Amino acid sequence: MIKPLSFSQTIAINKVSIKTWLSLGLLTASIFLPGMIHNQAITGPLINAILLLTTTLAGPSAAIMTGLIPSVVALSRGLLPVVLAPVVPFIMIANAVYVIVFARLKEKSFAGAVAAASVLKFGFLHLVSQVLLAQLLPGKFLTVASKMMSWPQLVTALVGGLIAWVALQTINDSKNN
């Protein structure tokens, strides 16, 4: 005979379900945004915000998994030129760095965590574009990749942090009302 769940077991299942739904919703957004919006200045901050929101609401593991998707979608939909395919694994690693650094520091200072995560993500991508991609890409494409992996990465990561902060404040305000 199957026993009914206790009240505490039901609450635990509901919390897992909420995290699961949030993760799936944010993952879905990360899949469709690059295909709908063909502008790095818009999609970059939104994807970074999704990564931070997922980290905060569902945990860093879910956020790291979410961070694997946008670049693959951008490449498969032709938003990222095929010749820049070697950049994709490095973007995935940079997204994981962004998530992990933010997750470790966010309890001390949200803004500090965003700043540190953004600088490290930018630094990693810039270093990769300057050192490794120079060996993989021809000159014209190296210039494009280097530009994409430089200061725009810092800006989009910081703006993504601001968007995530506003979204989390909105969520907290709605809980309190």
Image (tube, grey):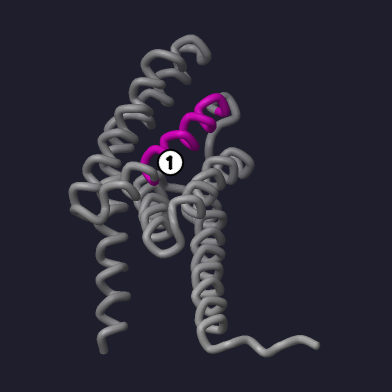
Between 139 and 8, the one lying in front of the other is 8
Query: Where residue 37 appears, x then y in whole percent?
Result: 47, 54
- Residue 52 horizontal side relative to residue 76, left or right: left
- Residue 128 horizontal side relative to residue 113, left or right: right
Identity, as a three-letter code, of the amino acid under mark 1:
Asn
Between 158 and 171, the one lying in front of the other is 171
Residue under the image location 40 percent in, 21 percent down: 129
Which residue is situated farthest in the top direction here?
135
Indicate whether residue 98 is drawn in magenta.
yes
Which residue was labeled with disc 1?
95
Query: Where residue 110 appears, x then y in whole percent?
Result: 22, 55
Quarter location, residue 172: bottom left
Quarter location, residue 155: top left
Residue under the image location 50 percent in, 12 percent down: 138
Quarter location, residue 77: top right
The crowd level at tag 1 (other Cα within 10 Å; few <14, some 14-19, many 20+) is: many
Give, as a single range, the part of the protein colored magenta: 85-99
- Residue 36 horizontal side relative to residue 50, left or right: right
Residue under the image location 34 percent in, 50 percent down: 103
Query: Where residue 4 appears, x then y in whole percent?
Result: 67, 90
